Image (cartoon, helix red, strand yellow):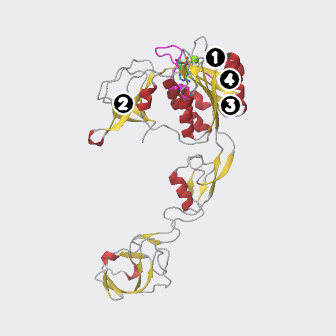
Amino acid sequence: MKTTTCDNHEPNFLRVEEALHNIEQNLKPIRGEEQLAIRSALDRILAEDVLSQINVPPYNNSAMDGYAVRGADLPTKDKAVLTLVGSSLAGRPCVEAIQAEQCARIFTGAVIPAGTDTVIMQEHVEKQGDTIIIGAEHKPGQHVRPLGEDIAVGQVVLKAGKRLSPADIGLLASLGIPEVKVKRRLRVAFFSTGDELCAVGEVPQSGQIYDSNRYTLYGMLNRLGVDIIDMGIVLDKPEDIENAFLLAASNNDAIITSGGVSVGEADYVTDTLRRLGEVNFWKVAMKPGKPLTYGKVQGAVFFGLPGNPVSAMVTFYQFVQSALQRMMGQESVTPIRFTVPCISPLKKSPGRMEFQRGILQTGEQGHLVVRSSGKQGSGILSSMSQANCFIILPLECGKVAAGSDVLVEPFELG
Ligand code: AMP
Ligand code: MG
């Protein structure tokens, strides 16, 4: 792995885009697949293309309630009189073949009877006993949904790498496909480092704080649909950190830690990783989340996130999430970003790309606007809890006046 640096303002800082590129360069999708019933495959990643074995719709059918007629019987001028000889209902096709100057009653979704190819809406006919009278305004083939119009036999309906949504599993059901091959779940282990950390449920001693990073990480990982191995809190002792690394690396695809990656006295994560595996330590030109360690330990991909609660979340969303998705075999994981007016002023100095916490909402006249969710310190989790998007401010930009357009990336809609 090669580390490049950015010489803008801070000589050894790496740009966010470069860090992202360096991470992605070294990642490959995991091997291993399993066959699952389609309901169990929800949110899993498809391991192979799915081809349709059938046509959808499976037969020509009516798009309207009305009368099935022969296109050849449509009058070119004046009117035509056709005799009603049968009916076709959804699930109960017409048994009679329709001859010249005959027609059949038909309802939406019903099979187009043999001999016919056109449907006249019931509002457009004059019914007299067992005959209908039609005018010259109709076109042959109208109001017929042809066989295979939606999907043809052999067509690829879902591509390998797709994360299966509710619509996807419904689509599979509509094709009569009961099972699909998906990627096995990624195994991700994580632990928090820090002598000051107290587990929730225990009584904090003087100078201790509760460990929240294992909860935010759990939440974000859970949503990605990975198998989660929570290894708890590890003290700032090189041998404890080393043991935790080795244990985590023995049976997992990825390891995530928080804390201990800056250059403080008790920051052993990067040193330990250097001894056991391959390391890239970066000071990324971003705020929050400056220090970030990325590497490998015995085949497992390693992410060392900063300890500050918001920094850990921001670095997860910006670097780890897409990396894990790539490892899971998921295609097209580009985040959705767009520009909206920001209704609050934002503080910012040039030199780092900032991921400020914002609240995206529907403003007056239905237009989206964003505002800051409050104090932006890297330890302030409450403004992260209130936020539903990042406001992404480029490295070069300074403070933002209220009313300016800003780039946002939602992470918590609905
Ligand atoms: P570090 O990156 O280890 O220097 O930690 C930076 C800041 O984040 C310190 O104030 C830590 O106390 C805090 N911190 C580290 N880990 C956690 C955690 N798991 N939960 C909450 N705060 C943390
Ligand atoms: Mg620490």
Tell me where the magenta segment starts and ends, as one range: 1-20
* Rendered image quadrant of residue 74: bottom left
- Neighbor class of circle 4 (other Cα within 10 Å; few <14, some 14-19, many 20+) is some
Of callouts 3 and 2, the N-terminal one: 3
- Neighbor class of circle 3 (other Cα within 10 Å; few <14, some 14-19, many 20+) is many
Q: CA distance from mark 1 to mark 4?
A: 21 Å
Q: Which residue is mark 4?
A: 278
Please say if 188 is above or below 6.
below
- Is there CB contact under 8 Å for labels 1 and 3? no
Q: Which residue is mark 1?
A: 236
Type of the residue with mark 2: Val
Of callouts 1 and 3, the N-terminal one: 1
- Neighbor class of circle 1 (other Cα within 10 Å; few <14, some 14-19, many 20+) is many
Of callouts 1 and 2, the N-terminal one: 1
Q: Is residue 288 toward the left or the right of residue 365 in the image?
A: right
**Residue at 50% across, 74% down:** 91
Depth check, front residue: 33 or 217: 217
Q: Which residue is mark 3?
A: 300
